[in-house]
Image (spheres, rainbow, N blue to C red):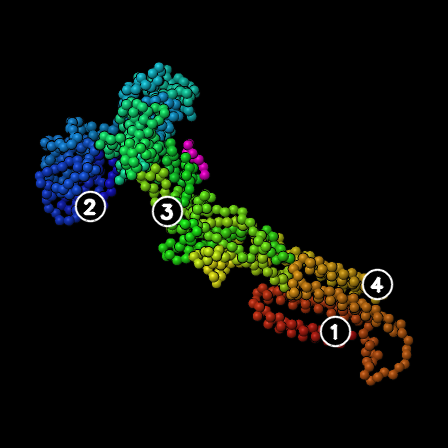
Amino acid sequence: MVQPFDAFLETWYHLCHTFSLHTYTIYLQGQEYVSGEILGEGGPLLTNGTLILGQEQDGVSQGFDPNQVLLGDLAQVNLWDRLVTPEEVKGMASCGSSNRGNVFSSDTAVLELFGDVSEKWVNVSYFCSSGPKYVMLPESRSITDARRQCHLSNASLALPTSESENQILVQVLERFQNVCSSTNVRKLWLGATDKEVEGKWRMDGSGNLMTYDKFYPPAPNGGTVGNCLVMRHDGAWEDDVCDERNKKCTSCYYQNSDYLRLRGLCFDNEHQQRFRVTGYMNGRPMYRGFYYLLIYWANNNTWYLTNARTNTTIASYSFSIAKHYPLGRLDWLLHTTICDLPEGDKIELSLSACPDDQYMCRDGECIASNRRCDLRTNCVDESDEENCNFVLLPKGYRQYLTPVSPGTGEKLSLVPHFSITRFDAIEDLSMTIALELKVSISWRDHRLTFRNLHDPERGSVISSTDRESIWLPQYDFENIYRGNIKMLEEVVVVNRSTNQSEANFNQVDMDTLHPGSESSLTHTKEFVAIFNCYFILYYYPFDSQFCEIRIRLSTHMRDHATFSMSQGVAEYLGVIDLPLYSVQYVALRKHTHDDVIFIDFVLKRRVGNAVLSIFVPTMLLLLVSWSTLFLKLEALNVRAIMSLTTLLVLYTMFANLSSSLPSTAEVKLIDVWFFFIIFLLFSNIMVHVFADQLQLHSPDNITKVSSFASPSSPSVGNLKKITPVRLLKFQRYVVLPLSFFIFTLNVVLDVALDVALDVTLDVALDVALDVVLDVVLDVALKVALNKK
């Protein structure tokens, strides 16, 4: 399929079609445009001896369509009975020769003219002439306003680059000599300035240095003050001040490809909306459409849109000041029925140079589409931040109805994303956890249409008004502690789909549209809440707490929506090591019901503080009590006071620790630790008491008394073996160290096995370990008792 080329007004195009036996070639402007094989059966093309120019027939010898008539000029139509060479085509396109056809030539044939058709003879070089296109704006303007007015018309401020171009501009100026500063010889602004470097004149737009000038001495003579360039009535150039109060006429330079677009009417194709600034009517430039429309100015400061083919007025717009042009978005008054609007109605039309991928401000300025509704005013008139609702609701949309999954019609799939941003407090006594949680739920609503979504990475935040008008997921937290929850922020973001549709070329607002079935909505809420968590404190302070946050959809949504576990995410964004705990992991867990989801996380208690505040002091107290076993037997008061003091201090520590932990029926490992240390300290006190009693009954303190002992009574010799010194040594070297070692080893292994193994294996190994330790302890005691 041949791609059409873009044609512009007032531009000659040379087209040549050549046919060989099997190949069809088209040349455009002397260059091969497309070439391909001829398909179908060959043979003569029957024309009934008639050749029609300037009108496309719907078929051979068929009817005509008024919309397919050529509105333009036609010349050098030639037919040959041979294949012309590429060199011949290039020569004709460059106006090197006329080279009339030997079968037919429009230059020599007698033509029958129908309709509004005229003929004239021109030189062949006329078709290749490309002089500059200057259009005069005959109103006094400042240099800033002049540059802006040309820019809005898709042109630039005129600046001749040769003597011939300068002469053309002088001829354009001659018509408006009396209008442009009639009391001043300096008539026209030119598009150059030497503001940056004095004497270095740079062209507007490109910033390149001028290669041509028309200064007559003593010009330029304005120094650093005269930074703007002007043209005199005779074509000479001078420098002038750029003050806003200094006003002159404006001439805009247009290229052949420069055109404007008229939006707001019901055109059938995009080319019908194209307009070009050309010619004058009533002393002002007029805008001529590529087809049959015309916009011109009347003396009553009113611009008219007319149909030149039917000579009817379509619409009009009046300004209070004559210098204004019909650029930008304006409300025109209809003079006839058009586009289903009656006569007398207002219709919003826009005339600007903005292409379809840009946004047009109300004054006609063009900005990038992604700067529309970006919470920054990019248009001078701030119109880019008007009507910034992203959501287009269809007729009959009901907010309370849950949408269905696009394409399937099944339950709506909700994709959850949970982020725990930080833990505020973890209370052991109340068994609660205070944290900040961000809940994001994504879905798609096929009923909606979105517009002007320009940020594919972060998405577009919709307004609170739009948020209140669409369906949003509702959910509840089931394990909130006494209703302690507060929402900090709520936002809804639309993520742009890749399948976007550009605005219809007739639309004035030029918004891009995105279907809701391919654009996901994300509803994000940030909470501060306190959640219940049942703490298992048996292994305190070596415990790890498993907690959860239970989320359930609201009752009226449970049968119509479900959480998607495959795409769901749960994460922790804060620091890992908290003051008392470390965050082990955060994960999602599925419930048996699709409308419920769990956020699981594990908090492992940091044992550093417990070691320093619990275990080290208790072990030091145990060492102090153990050291009393090394004192002399005569120092009973010292031994007793030291032992009792350590016991009292240890009990006080235990009482204080118990008050900081929840009161539970289960015995905690820390309780066992304190009970055991208390038992050891108590045993030391009892040893000191018994040692003192044995000291009182030692041989140095008793006299011999004869008595008759019964056969079952122990002999006096056996009793004499248990002396105070032996009792203290036995407690000092056997009972206390061995008991402490065995108990500590059992506790350490129990904690390690609980972490590494499951509960069943842990219990079995505990039993086996207890048996082994009992045997070891029994052997050690027997050895110590039999030792003198």
Q: Secondary structure at mark 4?
A: helix
Q: Are marks 2 and 1 in contact (CB under 8 Å)?
A: no
Return the x and y of residue 194 as percentages of the image width and height.
40, 24
Question: Marks 1/4: CA distance?
Answer: 28 Å
> Along the line of sight, which residue is nearer the eye, 777 or 405?
405
Label 1: which residue? 784
Residue drawn at (49%, 59%), measured in percent from left and top? 596
Q: Say above or below: 612 vs 633.
A: above
Q: Which residue is mark 3?
A: 395
Closer to the camera, 25 or 7? 7
> At 73% across and 76% down in the image, what residue appears?
782
Mark 4 or mark 3: whose residue is earlier in sequence: 3
The local secondary structure at tag 1 comes to: helix
C-alpha gap between disc 2 and disc 3: 50 Å
Find disc 4 in the rendering and name its residue.
637
Q: Depth-wise, is mark 3 or mark 1 nearer the camera?
A: 3
Q: Quadrant of residue 374?
A: top left
Report the amino acid beneath label 4.
Asn
Q: Is residue 709 above or below residue 237?
A: below
- Left/right placement of residue 148 relative to residue 107 reads right
Q: Is residue 691 visible?
A: yes
